[in-house]
Structure formats: structure tokens, C-alpha cells
Image (spheres, rainbow, N blue to C red):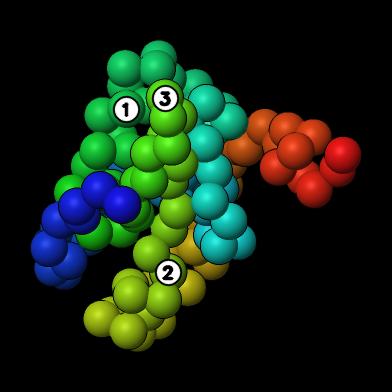
Amino acid sequence: MEETGEMTLPRVLTALSDPTRIGLVRALADGSEQGWGDLRTPVAKSTLSYHLKLLRDAGVTCTRKEGTRCFVRLRRDEIEERFPGLLASVLAAAEADGVGADVSVQRTRQAAGRP
């Protein structure tokens, strides 16, 4: 696992202040780990990398490298422990307002559990 940043309220709120980053959090909210290449966003790959770095540095996500691939997951339990109810509130408001709806995960056959 790569190091994650210190999880403080200002850093987490800053990380969650962008629609693309909220979309990434929404896409990872089911607790699954996703490959960076499976994340579909309306931004360039370099910009996606920047958004993922901000989320990781804020402690919102963690990243794992496997060979040449990188996988990211939401640190949902840690966020809930540190800031009870914050993530649920942000996700509910984002869903209600459609914030981040243009971010998705391309589920591969292997990731979907198919042979």
C-alpha cells in the first residue's frame, strides 16, 4: 500500500470540494477496489491522476500497486470512524444533486466476477 496523507477535516473537505473527486468517491463507495484504468471520467488521464492524488493525500482513498497497475479504494471505515456521518451526508447530497454522475467504473469481466 502506498502512504496516505493525514486525515484532517480541512484536507478531507478540500478533497471533496470538486465534482470529479466526488464522482470518484461515489464510484468507489461500494467498497470495491478499482484499477485506475477502469475509472471513467470526463477529464484527461493526467487530470484524473491529479484528482486521485489529492484524494489519497487527504486520506480519503488508498492506492495499491500490482506490477504496472494501480488500484484505488475508498477508506470508508476510516473516514466514518474519524468523521461519523460525513461521507454518508456527502454521498446522499451528491446523489440528490447529480454531482459526479459523469464518473463511472468500467466493470471488466474479471472484476465483475465472470470467467
Q: Position of residue 105 (x, y in %)?
A: 62, 37
**Residue under numbered circle 3:** 68
Regarding residue 100, the answer to whether it shows in the image is no
**Is residue 107 shown left or right of residue 65?**
right
- Circle 1 residues within 10 Å: few <14, some 14–19, many ≥20: few
Identify the residue shown where x is 33% and y is 75%. 78
What's the residue type where badge 3 is placed? Answer: Thr
Residue 5, how many percent across, how many down? 15, 56
Q: Amino acid at mark 2?
A: Arg
Instruction: Give the structural element (helix, strand or loop) at label 3.
Output: loop
Q: Which mark is residue 76?
A: 2
Between 70 and 78, the one nearer to me in the picture: 70
Distance from Cα at disc 2 to Cα at disc 3: 25 Å
Q: Earlier in the sequence, mark 3 or mark 1?
A: 1
Choose mark 2 or mark 3, whichever is in front: 3
Element type where label 1 sits in the image: helix
Marks 2 and 1, how far apart in space? 20 Å
Earlier-in-chain disc, 2 versus 1: 1
Q: Residue furthest right?
A: 115
Question: Residue 51 occupies which quadrant of the picture?
Answer: top left
Q: Nearer the viewer, mark 3 or mark 1?
A: 3
Q: Nearer the viewer, residue 33 or 66?
A: 66
Q: Amino acid at mark 1?
A: Ser
Q: Is residue 44 left or right of residue 50?
A: right
Residue at 31% of width from left, 52% of height from top?
Answer: 1
Q: Quadrant of the C terminus?
A: top right
Query: Dot 3: few (<14), some (14–19), or many (≥20) neighbours within 10 Å?
Result: few
Any part of residue 24 in sight: yes
Q: Indicate the secondary structure of the residue bearing disc 2.
A: helix
Q: Which residue is mark 1?
A: 49
Left or right placement of residue 74 versus residue 58 in this view: right
Marks 3 and 1, how far apart in space? Answer: 15 Å
